[in-house]
Structures are given as C-alpha cells and as structure tokens.
Amino acid sequence: MPTSNVWNTKNGWGPRTGGYRLNSIGHIYGNGRNYNAVILSRAPSGFYYGRDTVNGVSKILYAALAQPLA
C-alpha cells in the first residue's frame, strides 16, 4: 500500500432484513487530492461477504489515489 495517502474512516454494520449491512464513510487525502467516500453494502451472505466487499473497494480507491495528478 502507498504511504502518501491518509484515509480516516468510520464503519458501521449489523444484521437487517434481507441481509447484513456494512457501511463505511471516509476522508481520503494525499498526492494533491482531497475526497470523501461512502461505501454502502447489503450482504445477503452475511458479515464476511460484506466486509470483503468494503475492503476490496477501499483497496481499489486507495491504490488509485496513490498516483500523483498529472
């Protein structure tokens, strides 16, 4: 993972009708960028499926922001 970005995050999760909910909101900055991101998920297969989904999206965003703006 790049070290030039900083990501502050708040997560929430819990069982709901129709599947587990995992939500994440964060502030990302570094390499000349400053963004807020929200990931909302509904995980019919349970907590671990939702956790893996949120983590996967987070890794994609973090890696993409590691590249300096041209």
Image (cartoon, helix red, strand yellow):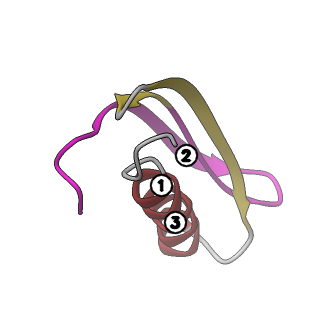
Q: Please state which of residues 10 and 13 is positioned toward the viewer in this rendering.
A: 10
- Discs 1/2, front: 1
Q: Please state which of residues 53 and 32 is positioned toward the viewer in this rendering.
A: 32
The residue labelled by disc 3 is 47
The residue stretch that appears in magenta: 1-25
Mark 3 Cα-neighbour bin, 10 Å: few <14, some 14–19, many ≥20: some
Give percent across and percent down for residue 60.
51, 63
Mark 1 Cα-neighbour bin, 10 Å: few <14, some 14–19, many ≥20: some
The residue labelled by disc 2 is 14
Question: Helix, strand or loop at disc 2?
Answer: strand
Number of residue marks: 3
Q: Please state which of residues 10 and 3 is positioned toward the viewer in this rendering.
A: 3
Q: Is residue 58 magenta?
A: no
Does the residue at mark 3 contact the one at mark 2 (Cβ under 8 Å)? no
Residue 28 vs 23, above or below: the answer is: above
Q: Give the distance between the C-alpha atoms of the residues marked 1 and 2, in whole angstroms.
A: 19 Å
Give percent across and percent down for residue 33.
46, 27
Mark 3 vs 2, N-terminal side = 2
Quadrant position of the N terminus in the picture: bottom left
What amino acid type is highlighted by mark number 1? Answer: Ser
The residue labelled by disc 1 is 58
Residue 45 vs 64, above or below: the answer is: below
Give the residue displayed 49% in from the left and 40% down from the top.
69
Question: Helix, strand or loop at disc 1?
Answer: helix
Give percent across and percent down for residue 53.
57, 67
Give percent across and percent down for residue 34.
47, 21
Q: Quadrant of residue 27?
A: top left
